[in-house]
Amino acid sequence: MKGVVFRLESDLPAEAMFLLQDFRLAVNCAIRAGLQARVTSRNAICRMAYNDFRKDYPDMYAQHLVSSFEVAASALKNHRRLFRKGLSARVPYVRRLMMRTENQAYKLDRGKGTIDLPIKAGRHVMLKLVVSQYHRRYLDDSSLSLGSLTVLPDRVIVPFRKDAPRPYPPESALSLDTNERSLDGLLVDEGSAAVVKASFPDVAAIQMRHHDRRKRLQKKKAHDRRTSRELCKREGRREHNRVEYRLHKVADAVLSFAEDKKSTIVLEDFHGIRHKKNKDLNRRLSQWPRRKLHRIIEYKAQWRGIPVVKVDPRYSSRTCPICGRKQHSRMGAVFECECGWRLDRHINASINLLQTAISRGMVGGLRFDPGAFQHDVMMTLYEPAMAARSEPNGTSCVHVAT
Ligand SMILES: [Zn+2]
């Protein structure tokens, strides 16, 4: 599932704006009703509230009303989850103007780029979408089906769904250790192995720069909390966009490489790892881009039919892949073991991830002998300079001194 954003060629017609307002009202009423009756499922809310709402909104298209219950149900579920975790007790309330409608309720003309949106019985509005080449790729692919439409005052989001292709049978493994500034690892196939690296030092740099800027803003606007908050929010959005743009580039490069080599991608499973509360700024900042990068890689891989497996990363950075000894403390840049094994710490971690995956049978019949591994060639999957190039070719070889 991929949500594609379309801008509208002109403002939403007044009728549609009224519909958005009604929809928001219906959602918020349903949320309150659901909270009172302690129900969170769409069907329960629907049974309970449909008739009352019908009286209040006699004109609203029935499908839209049911969709509003759906939105309310997901807000309630989210609320319950946060509430149980003790994170939020605030009653959920939808502020922004929006509506959602199921795929039976609207009609998308893929050729013309228009959406026919019913308002009420006998009344429809036609929304003209701004269609670029990027949008054409989705519109023209008839194998993609449509999900629920989201309508906002200036844009719509159309989810395109594809039956996930079956992942290819892997001929190699691309094992990657995820770090703050890079993905480091190995490409291993039957008989050979090479060190690979995708580096994105600019992500941490952007985060740092924006962090400083926010700090300065807060200080400068200390007398005006509201303005300060607004400016910080804008800073945050910018940072988010800039980081995400780069993560997508990294993910695309890694995926194209894996596809080319028919690899299974092996990543560490961050799930369930609770980091100790850490005041160290760098650590805190570095958490979300890594997780985000994994999410992007995973969903794009699924879309493209590239197999991804995730393994428990515990001790992966402290274990010797030759003799199995666990080092007590984290290492410097180089992992060293009493048995004589010596290797870049990150590459070493990726070997351990790969061996876990192999021992669990997650990468087919692939074998790997770390003892016979020569690591004098490094393949660059991605580096910041590639962001400037129009077409990253995915690989370039450089020799590294060892
Ligand atoms: Zn050892």
Image (tube, grey):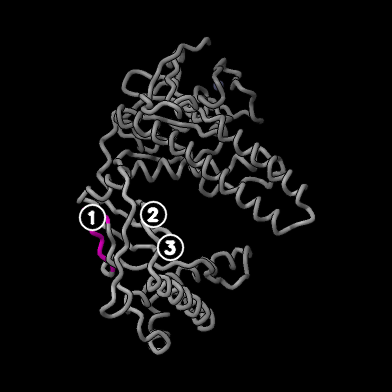
The residue drawn where x is 63% and y is 70% is 89
The residue drawn where x is 53% and y is 11% is 402
Residue 360 lies within the magenta run = no
Residue 108 lies within the magenta run = yes
- Relative to 140, is 209 on the left or the right? right
Residue 123, position as x, y percentages in the image: 28, 76
Q: Give the residue number, with chain letter if any, for mark 1.
A: 112
Mark 3 or 2, nearer chain start: 2
Q: Give the residue number, with chain letter if any, for mark 2.
A: 7
Image: 17 above or below 351? below
Residue 278, position as x, y percentages in the image: 69, 44
What is the three-letter code of the residue carrying label 2? Arg
- Relative to 169, is 368 on the left or the right? right
Task: Give how far apart the Cα atoms at labels 3 and 2 are.
Answer: 10 Å
Q: Give the residue number, with chain letter if any, for mark 3.
A: 152
- Relative to 122, is 240 on the left or the right? right
Q: Residue furthest right?
A: 223
Residue 255, position as x, y percentages in the image: 36, 34
Residue 101, position as x, y percentages in the image: 34, 68
What is the three-letter code of the residue carrying label 3? Leu
The residue drawn where x is 64% and y is 30% is 330
Using the rendered image of the protein, determine whether residue 3 is visible from the camera's viewpoint: no
Are the residues at dot 3 and dot 2 in contact (C-beta closer than 8 Å)? no
**Neighbourhood count class around disc 2 (C-alpha, 10 Å): few under 14, some 14–19, many 20 upward:** some
Mark 1 or 3, nearer chain start: 1
